[in-house]
Image (spheres, grey):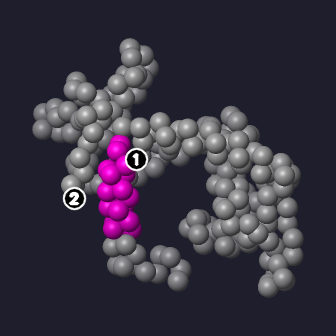
Amino acid sequence: MGLRVSAGCGLSLQSGRQSASGSGKRCMDDIGDDIMVKQAMEVLDSRWTTAGPWNLPYRVLLVAKLIDRVTARHVRDTAQLSLAQWRALTHVAHLQPCSASTISGIAMVDRAEVSRALGALEEAGLIRREANPKNRKSNLVSLTEKGEEIHAAVRGERGGFYRDWLADISEEDRATIDAGLRCIAGRIVARSPDILDV
């Protein structure tokens, strides 16, 4: 099944190169005449076409970096957290009680970075530590009531971002994109299984 781009997210072709913000119908019909948005879309178009459609990994990384930047700004402004702290908080919320090494393994992030983030979260009163009954050398962390409240509030707002970002993509196309990304991830792991520390 091929990916069909919805009418609201049509991409135009300019000089044989795919354009994210071309003169045709765009992904965001509601941007109006905002000059700053138009300039930003031109920059995006330039970066998007740096590599051709054959270089999908580059485009996946570009989208991931855009999400990181928006997320970092949002969690800083709303909860006074760094991106690393927010990610650690979110993993604790989903895995609690859990250890730093568990978070590190699942998030594929350096354990020292996770430990620093957890230390800051504990200092802010967002997580608590307790002894790990299975390993006396490590602690288990879980969210405090304050941590639960902040996570729920920020997560709710982030859900609004996700809905907006995906508004032009049908459920069927979302499933196709998800399956394609999983296929790419599977091939990467099949060729280099050691990257998951199994």
Q: Is residue 181 magenta?
A: yes
Q: Residue at x 71, y 59 (%)?
A: 93
Distance of mark 2 from mark 1, alpha carbons?
Answer: 25 Å
For residue 55, what is the image quadrant? bottom left
Q: Residues within 10 Å of mark 2 (few under 14, many from 20)?
A: few
Residue lying at the far front in this picture: please name it. 171
Amino acid bearing label 2: Met
Q: Position of residue 53 (x, y in %)?
A: 23, 50
As helix, strand or loop, the secondary structure at mark 1 comes to: helix
Q: Is residue 120 left or right of residue 189?
A: right
Q: What secondary structure characterizes most of the magenta part? A: helix
The residue that label 1 is drawn on is 62
Residue lying at the far left in this picture: please name it. 16
Q: Residues in magenta?
A: 169-185
Which quadrant is home to the N terminus? Answer: bottom left
Relative to 51, say whether 17 is above or below: above
Q: Residues within 10 Å of mark 1 (few under 14, many from 20)?
A: some
Q: Residue at x 46, y 49 (%)?
A: 64
Q: Residue at x 68, y 73 (%)?
A: 101
Front-lying residue, 110 or 157: 157
Q: Is residue 100 magenta?
A: no
Amino acid bearing label 1: Leu
Q: Position of residue 29 (x, y in %)?
A: 35, 25
The residue that label 2 is drawn on is 1
Checking the image for residue 89, the label placed there is none
Front-lying residue, 163 or 192: 163
| Residue 95 visible in the displayed image | yes
